[in-house]
Image: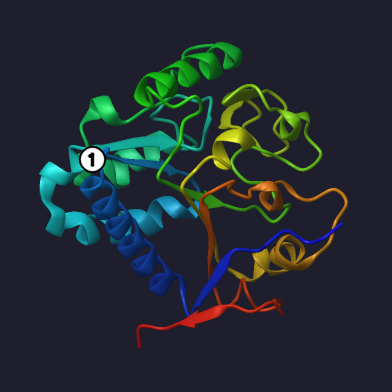
Amino acid sequence: MAAPAPGLISVFSSPQELGASLAQLVAQRAACCLEGARARFALGLSGGSLVSMLARELPAAVAPAGPVSLARWTLGFCDERLVPFDHAESTYGLYRTHLLSRLPIPESQVITINPELPVEEAAEDYAEKLSQAFQGDSIPVFDLLILGVGPDGHTCSLFPDHPLLQEREKIVAPISDSPKPPAQRVTLTLPVLNAARTVIFVATGEGKAAVLKRILEAKEENPLPAALVQPHTGKLCWFLDEAAARLLTVPFEKHSTL
């Protein structure tokens, strides 16, 4: 089996430089989309270390565009843990506290799960909200998805060898047996990830080096979930720091703001 096209790989000397460049890319992508015919920008965010990275860099990067620009953003989440929003594991809750308090996106355009529903109903409810937000699209087409990757190769709440990797009909799926706690989650499916106009994977630290080598260089019969993200017509990018990229032999672009 041939290795998938790895996409554009950008390597930064530190997570701080990576974060600053990521925020500038989000701002540029937003400006480009808002100037287009649809005049809106649809962004999908992941949790984990991305929360603090974006909270640190994104407000300043988008500030020059002003609140009129942010009023035309639509914000969704690539996956979510089925916990109350004030729980430490809530992705939306963390963004609400650390980023959205400083980024005046209208609350009606921030699409969240209903954590009070059972997991199957929460997935259906979130799918319905996305369908309403992306009216006219047979499947939600995000302008930009920012994804993380776990040391096991998972992305969103799509885990290695899990049946959800075969899901082709649903745009949002429930998971009740996540190998990483909490067990109950809601996740976008591969058809949505691969419909995006741009997907950026972000990975930092030496603990990601081995799995990134597998994802970006190996020819595996059973690819890891992150390797299955191959946008059909969109652009795929990888933003890595030097520690995460240290085992790579494929070509990459080295960036430094120093």
Q: Nearer the viewer, residue 14 or 40?
A: 40
Q: Residue 112 at what x, y percent from top left?
A: 40, 26
Marker count (numbered)? 1
Secondary element at tag 1 = loop
| Residue at the (40%, 34%) spot, across then down | 76
Q: Residue 84 at what x, y percent from top left?
A: 44, 24
Q: Nearer the viewer, residue 180 or 63?
A: 63
Residue 39 appearing in the image = yes
Q: Nearer the viewer, residue 48 or 40?
A: 40
Tell me where residue 170 sits by quadrant: top right
Direction from residue 190 to residue 70 in the image, left or right = left
Label 1 Cα crowd, 10 Å radius (few <14 / some 14-19 / many 20+): some
| Residue at the (43%, 21%) spot, across then down | 131
Q: Residue 118 at what x, y percent from top left?
A: 56, 12
Image quarter hosting the C terminus: bottom left
Q: Which residue is outermost to the front?
A: 37
Direction from residue 109 to residue 168 in the image, left or right = right
Tell me where residue 29 sits by quadrant: bottom left
| Residue at the (67%, 66%) spot, across then down | 207
The residue at which mark 1 appears reads as: 39
